[in-house]
Amino acid sequence: MQAPPSTQIEPSTAMHGGMRCGDCPIRYRAVCAQCEGEELAVLERMKFYRSFEAGQPIVWEGDRMDFVASVVTGVATLTHVLEDGRTQMVGLLLPSDFLGRPGRDQAAYNATAATGVVLCCFRRGPFDQMMQRTPHLAHRLLEMTLDELDAAREWMLLLGRKTAREKIASFIAIIARRQAALQKRRPAGRIALELPLTREAMAVYLGLTIETVSRQMTALHRDGVIEIAGKRGVTLTDYARLIQESGGYSDGGKAA
Amino acid sequence: MQAPPSTQIEPSTAMHGGMRCGDCPIRYRAVCAQCEGEELAVLERMKFYRSFEAGQPIVWEGDRMDFVASVVTGVATLTHVLEDGRTQMVGLLLPSDFLGRPGRDQAAYNATAATGVVLCCFRRGPFDQMMQRTPHLAHRLLEMTLDELDAAREWMLLLGRKTAREKIASFIAIIARRQAALQKRRPAGRIALELPLTREAMAVYLGLTIETVSRQMTALHRDGVIEIAGKRGVTLTDYARLIQESGGYSDGGKAA
DNA sequence: CGGGTCGTTGATCACAATCAAACACCGTGG
DNA sequence: CCACGGTGTTTGATTGTGATCAACGACCCG
């Protein structure tokens, strides 16, 4: 029924080689959103695609990184690791999100493909120069970075103060909200969705262990907040109920 | 010996009214750092100062906020609060840090003066327009926002995965590093410093309770990692030792 | 001296981590 | 066809860290 994420990816970059920016699914949300005409044409000439299978590393913290990229399809994660192996996810990149930092040539985090991922890449040098000349690009990137900062701060509240149950409920709510946003709807009532992460990755995201994630999922199911279908499938019986369980809806609709 | 922070502040904005940007202590780190000549002159005409005493709120989450500002002196905090009162700090603003978001008229967080604070403010409308016309300003703000995002992600690792002891050690290390950076030195060996936060505020920063903060401070002292002098004074016996206690020095010198 | 704020210390509890085992589902190969 | 190993998930028993509840101490200022 549900194809595993790893089957969703393109096997090679070949089929993207010819894609036109005008047809790009993330055209109006990505860093290039405000570029038109000649600006877009320059980016179009610069861009190249790279694909990654689920589970593959994209870059390691500290590695030289000579490109920046937009996520076209799939989900990538950014993680920090302590010396003894404890791992915390610090970024969840969905389609249109930006990977890499202009002006920095070393990756600050591990980036990993959580599902199959297609990136639209630009070599860093040319992109940096383009940034200097193109206010549209710089402006859009600032906007996106400010949004990410807001998301990171919301995440800090979750990590620092929420219970395990609230963390799980919050995570599901975030996924539900994003899915609704893609369809330009407000989330409400009964919603079916597919989690983009394994239990393991959820644990790394939420600052929990995999066992606690599993237990709280079971508990939310037992209490009638969600239904569970297979490994990735979740249906919330009532969005408002889930928000209550998440310990407070502090995100006042900041996300675009 | 140590004056309480509340006595460090200026009693009114009057004495700042005449300050020239050329004499500003944060001239080369703030959002205006890359502006010169006419650009700076425009900002100079726009700016106005506001002071806050320790403990005073600057803005509340959801309030209309018709200015943006740089912290000139003192320390301000950004916090998120859940409905039931649980509170998490999500930003610690030191001199030269930027408060507010261009293009947004509602505060996303509570901002509070942790010590006496002086802000260099700009009305949001004119500042937004200035941003459009001044690539230097937009570029610098992007740079600062990216740095903040890095800091937020480091903080997420702390909140999600570090033990109470590691959190305390990390916090002290951050303060030591920042203090050293002001003096353009690398932190090393024995370092005396003054904590800019109360135990309460430290707890809110670190996602702990005040009791746990106190206990871990005592424990680090008992184990010879730090010495404690009064409420705010701390001396680390050896910076390298403190870093070990902090659970891993993942911040590879990203902070400017 | 009293009241206030801030910090420390102690006793107990609860939540999530840890250690351990079993289960569901998958594709593979005998 | 079914046994097999592998991966991801669930469930159980126990432990440990930090929260909670409570009292006390240090310091400051009126």
Image: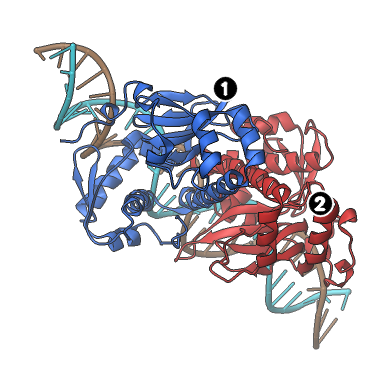
Chain colours: A red, B blue, C brown, D cyan
Q: Quadrant of the N terminus of chain B?
A: top left
Find residue C17 and report its horizontal and vertical position in percent.
Answer: 48, 54
Residue at figure coordinates x 67%, y 43% from the top left: A143
Q: Quadrant of the C terminus of chain B?
A: bottom left
Residue nearer the viewer, B4 or B41: B41
Find residue D20 and report its horizontal and vertical position in percent.
Answer: 40, 31
Residue at figure coordinates x 23%, y 37% from the top left: B231
Disc 2 marks which amino acid? Ile
At numbered mark 1, what does the secondary structure look like: helix, strand or loop?
loop
As drawn, A22 above or below B71 = below
Disc 1 marks which amino acid? Asp
As drawn, A70 above or below B108 = below
Q: Which residue is mark 1?
A: B63
Residue nearer the viewer, A130 or B41: B41
Q: Say left or right for A87 vs B165.
A: right
Q: Say left or right for B169 vs C7.
A: right
Residue at figure coordinates x 57%, y 22% from the top left: B63
At numbered mark 2, what does the secondary structure look like: helix, strand or loop?
loop
Residue under mark 1: which chain is it in?
Answer: B
Residue B95 occupies quadrant: top left
Query: Gap in Å between the C-alphas at discs 2 and 1?
Result: 33 Å
Mark 2 residue crowding within 10 angstroms, few (<14) / some (14–19) / many (20+): some
Residue nearer the viewer, A246 or B55: B55
Q: As drawn, which residue projects farthest toward the front?
A: B37
Q: Which residue is mark 2?
A: A26
Q: Say left or right for A93 vs B214.
A: right
Q: Say left or right for A171 vs B70.
A: right
Find residue C25 and report its horizontal and vertical position in percent.
Answer: 79, 62
